[in-house]
Image (cartoon, grey):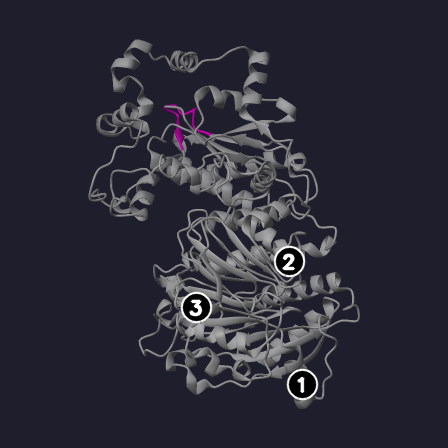
Amino acid sequence: MVVLTKEEFARAEAETLWSPQMEKDACGVGFVTSIEGAPSHKILQEGRTMLERMAHRGACSCDNDSGDGAGVMAAIPDEFYRTQMLRNDKLELPPFGQYATGILFLDKETYKQAKEAFCDMATACGLRVLGWRKLLTCSESIGAEARKTEPCIRQVFVGADHAEDKERFERDVYMLRKQAIVQMAKQSVDCYVCSLSTSTIVYKGQFTPNQLYKYYDDLTNLEFKSHLALVHSRFSTNTFPSWSRAQPNRMVAHNGEINTLRGNVNYMRAREGVMKSKLFGDDLQKLYPVVEEGLTDSGCFDNVLEFLVKAGGRSLPEAAMTMVPEAWEKDEEMTPEKRSFYRWASMCMEPWDGPALLAFSDGRYVGAILDRNGLRPARYYLTEDNHLYLSSEVGVVDLPVESVVKKDRLRPGRMLLVDTHQKKIEQDEDLKLRIANQRPHKKLAHSRVYLDHMRKDDVLSFGALTSDHLIRKELKIRGINTEDAMRRLDSDRRLSLFSFTPDTFSLLLIPMIKEKKEALGSMGNDAALACLSDYSPLLFSYFQQLFAQVTNPPIDPFREQVVMSLRCPVGPESNILEPGVELKGRLILDQPVMSLVDMMVLKRTQYKGWRTQVIETVYPARHGSRGLLPALDRICSEACAAALDGCQILVLSDRSVTKDLVPISSLLALGAVHQCLVKQRLRSKVALVVESGEVKFVHDFCVLLGFGADAICPYL
């Protein structure tokens, strides 16, 4: 582990292979909670024991004394804070629930400026800063490397004249938290808000698990009482640690990684163009970006979860259930109500997928959810005094055997939830059925469109169509003899143009056709680096080498089919902030690879008002290499214009390639259009379909899907 200053972070991003977008965590996580919501200092101490026994799940620096990060989330100890503020600042806090508090990490040079700016932003949000508290900390207890970047730590208390209106007050507090992060960054003033809440408080930093409670004096004060202690020990995978990257975040502590992170973040940014809120009105723009810059995968997940709860009209367990769905499509025993919920949720947003154990809390709810594959462990114990212990491994707390009422593990895709207001544990099946019955989800998602509907409409409008007919028609237009095309590879010059070789057919395509699976080699890819080659390899080759240098076994589609699905909704998305409103009709594709017939159906469909715009991804050969950038600009402009004009499907096609028109790499064109639409907040209005002759291998399809394609037609 390496500890970097702010300047060194900037230099590392500019001059090395490290990228902040690749920040991942592999950690220890757990919680202790009283099911009855009874606060005690004992719970905080048991959280300490749990955290310190997961020290091996964290990492430390070269000085063996600076950690990757550790932290604890607790319920706000109202009596303790009330006593402290009255004793030290002569400040009488409002009744519990009518003030919010949180810990801020500030720069030691600019902390006064940050405090003034925070007060101004609080006023702009209809709030007022009641007071500041300087926490008692022990810098001697942390490592020398961590001390180099130790921030100025202050606790803030915020109130409002309308604090009795709990929902309005919560919204204003959330807006202040978002504004503090975004606006301070624009002013180049360091300000990280660990949490700002009316119910929970987060203590964290760049510690080893054994240092957290030694550093913050509050945590060892017997007057500090809480009904929950959610702890986290961080091991930063391929990343640099920092004080702000420590966990828990504002709602979540996470062990694992989000493999779909880049796509998740892009799509959340794109949704900012279609989201509206009756509660926030025009102020909704102040909550953007939903996903803040420079966060780890855990931080990004936390941002979206918090957004769905604070602005999206969802409870915390429903938001978690939406973002981390269980494997539902092939579960024949699932209840119809729960299936309808997951189908509705899949049309609202894509899952945040990857091996993950996520523990979460908002003060009322304390729970955990496991990814659909169950690739991270979670064990829990229920004791006779109505305390629940959950952690990423066993042996983290000492419990007398006779006091344990139940012990079990969290299973793949399942959720465990404690409702401290109702004073009960909700098991997965009952919890999800209750959430599924909150709204008529089947009715809300009934307007979805299936490709089969478009096929039938196309037959009625244009007559039946076959792939053989389309192939012969294409060859005839290009003046290619059909019989020659069947016997000789060089009869169709497009094959060599798109890098088809005899080896491509004999070693890869023919075995794939015969065996109905991808041909596998061994010991990785020994070809010359694509980025240095003089033979103009396709962009796909670069990403294949970037992905892995050794052969990994593929996911088994037979043994693991219960947790796999290729079905995906594409096309215009609905407003996720109004969960009770009927969704727009999205097109449901059973799988993303389109046949020639289906491609033709999509191009000329007018079913239920759907329209398609074909954008040519070719440009005149006479323009040479200088024509590439203007051509990409033209393609992006046409895509934006079509999205604004109401087209639901955009097809990026290089079919019109000739000796005078050269194709742009399908991956390059797709990436440019996808990112342009995301930046213009138009991506959620359209489906992107790639029609290209250069797509041939399974990896090619995967890369295109990863860079934003909704469907692909490999017409050659």
* Badge 3 or badge 1: first in the primary sequence: 1
Judging by the rendered image, the residue that carries numbered circle 2 is: 287
* Element type at mark 2: helix
Q: What amino acid is at disc 1?
A: Thr
* Badge 2 or badge 3: first in the primary sequence: 2
On the picture, is 551 further left or further right than 443? left
Judging by the rendered image, the residue that carries numbered circle 3 is: 401
How crowded is the residue under tag 1: few (<14 C-alpha within 10 Å), some, or many (20+)?
some
Q: Nearer the viewer, mark 2 or mark 1?
A: 1
Answer whether residue 132 is visible to the viewer in this image: no
Please identify the dominant SS of the magenta region. Answer: loop
Residues marked 3 and 1 touching at CB (< 8 Å): no
| Residue found at x 41% / y 78% | 210
Magenta span of residues: 653-663
Q: Quadrant of the N terminus?
A: bottom left
| Residue found at x 74% / y 83% | 92
Q: What amino acid is at disc 2?
A: Leu
Q: Where residue 196 sits: x, y (%)?
A: 62, 69
Compute the Cα span from label 2 to label 1: 34 Å
Residue 292 higher or lower than 63, as above or below: above
Judging by the rendered image, the residue that carries numbered circle 1 is: 83
Q: What amino acid is at disc 3?
A: Val
Res 395 quadrant in image: bottom left
